[in-house]
Image (cartoon, helix red, strand yellow):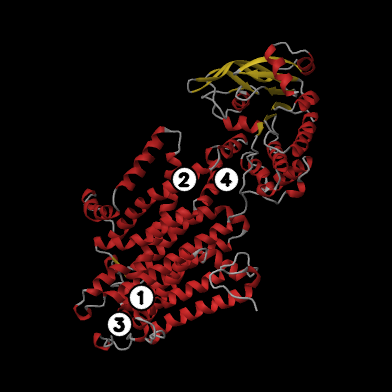
Amino acid sequence: MSDPIIKIQNMNKWFGDFQVLKNINLEVEANKKIVVCGPSGSGKSTLIRCINRLEEHQEGDIIVDGNELSEKTKDIEKIRAEVGMVFQQFNLFPHLSILDNCTLAPIWVKKMPKKEAQELALDQLKKVQIDDQANKFPGQLSGGQQQRCAIARALCMQPKIMLFDEPTSALDPEMIKEVLDAMVSLAKGGMTMIVVTHEMGFAKEVADEVIFMDEGMIIEKADTKEFFANPKSDRTKLFLSQIL
Amino acid sequence: MQTINFLKPNRDNIKNYSIIGSFLVLISLIDVISNAFLKTNLTSFLPGSLSSLFPLILGLIGLNMMRIDYSGNKTLDKLNKNINTNNFNAVLTLLILFSIIKALPPSLNWMILDANISGDTKDACTGTGACWTYIKVWFRRFMYGMYPNEFHWRINTAFILVIALGFVGYFMKENLKKYLALYYVIIYPVIAYLVIYYLISGGSFGLQWVETGAWGGLSLTFIVSFFCLIFCFPLGMIFALGRRSNLPAIKYISICYIEFWRGVPLITVLFMSSVMFPMFLPEDFFMDKLVRVIIAITLFEAAYCAEVIRGGLQSLPRGQYDAAKSLGMGYWKMHIFVILPQALKLVIPGIANTFLALVKDTPLIFVVGLAELAGMLALAKTNPKWLGFAMEGYIFASIIFWIICYAMSKYSYNLEAKYKTER
């Protein structure tokens, strides 16, 4: 067994007086796919936002790829460059074309030559099947296309880990499939993924482990088959009975 | 033939109604026009009060007849939708039209028909109209202030050079485009300063020295506005970012700066800069009054720019920051490539507003003894040989300021349209 690429120990986080995350312990090994599910406000999004330090935690340790995240972390940008993230609201840069969205960070953060960055971007866009839209602006694309572009943009940084924060929640039912397809093929390529989602079909298909969260705590963490076939806690059973 | 009811337009008979309606409106307009221009009352056969109300009533009936929804005629529909939605609006429309027509002949008479422009002295102005001779004689003063007449070419050349340098950005090669901001924020102002210093001030290259006290008129308006505009924008940007910074020192310095400059009137700032400020300087240190004034206005307007830009920064969704950070961008990269391009685009109208206000604030430098266009007017109107022509002067100045400001606002609309790529 290899060392875990993400290691979270006894992590606590507060928003003001409100404790959003309580005593989180989590280890993710390289190339594993983890699905995080749970009701609204259970802290799923906050948890994965802590992993690339878009949110700061107050107690405990988070170690990503051997780097501890804390106030002292100097090169947080370097760690973030290794951790791609896809958001619920896509968050493409509306003033840049699709291609420029994908090449911006490789050129300016990784100092990649422009031509190389463009080739890489087109390659990634081709994988999510929107290379024909490369010169359009985000506003001209459908939600599904925008989200696939967001995936390609994150992949252009060639990250070791990909975080997905409810990537399909803002999409029409018809478009969910095209985004999930892109994620499935990414998973089959061997990427380490942590996915917050309500798409249980996706979880069954690709996840190695499923985590169920409620009220800021990890209630249950189990292998995918085990999780669906034989949930242990009552809270999980209730949740699954409502969502499936 | 169908009967025509004057007050209840009928959709089946649109053509007749609209033709008769517009004919009635036309008659009412002709009546007012003949009254205003030819001084003849076409309706003198009617009793007095009815005679003056006649065009209004006629026009109202006409507009009422034309008011047919979805007539199918584009012009008519547009007319009805915009100025003829109900009787009240129809009356307002007619009243506005009539007052414009009534006001035209006297103002035309004063400005053009009865006006004088010949001659070189006050005696040429004999008519009851405007005396444009005054403007003609003083034109050079209004443009160049007390700057010696034989050196006016120096100002012209300097301006042409500065404007030409401003267009360099358009012709830059693609691989130099990334230095565009650097050019406009740092290099261009420095070159412009040198050009203006060596050409207009003179003192070297065989050019005679002309002190800034002699500068004036429209050219001074341009010089002051130009430098204030190009310096206050980047400065404002820095303070806008500073006010949103997480570092307490930078944040509170920015807040203090902005609140201080927004809290004091420009006129006191100008007084301070020219009267008080030199007292705090070491004796052998000299800074020209014009330079001090430009610095004062720049610092003042930068505070306003900062708040406008901060508004733009705040209107961006948090997701843009998240996305930029998650791609590994640091503070500066995030702001330069993601945040500022979007925020600045959003604040173009606000910035244009601030800039227009700045240009129109420049006449205030008169209080420290610098006479730009409006200041020269104030001087000229007290000249004993030319007493009594303040009106002409101020109309002239208004027209010039209006042209400058309208050009600026038009340019800002163009910028808005140019960068409207998405959303």
Q: Name the amino acid type tagged 4.
A: Phe
| Label 4: chain letter | B
Element type where label 2 sits in the image: helix
Element type where label 1 sits in the image: helix
Real-space Cα distance between discs 2 and 3? 48 Å
Q: Are marks 3 and 1 on the same chain?
A: yes
Residue underneath mark 2: B311
Q: Are marks 4 and 1 on the same chain?
A: yes
State which quadrant residue A73 falls in: top right
Residue underneath mark 4: B337
Point out residue B154 in the picture as x, y percentages from the top left corner.
Answer: 38, 73
Residue underneath mark 3: B131
Residue underneath mark 1: B152
Real-space Cα distance between discs 3 and 1? 25 Å
Foreground pick, B211 / B166: B166
4 or 3: tag closer to the N-terminus: 3
Pointer 3 local density, CA inside 10 Å: few below 14, some 14–19, many at least 20: many
Element type where label 4 sits in the image: helix
Tell us which disc is closer to us: 4 or 3: 3
Foreground pick, B298 / B347: B347
Q: Name the amino acid type tagged 2.
A: Gly
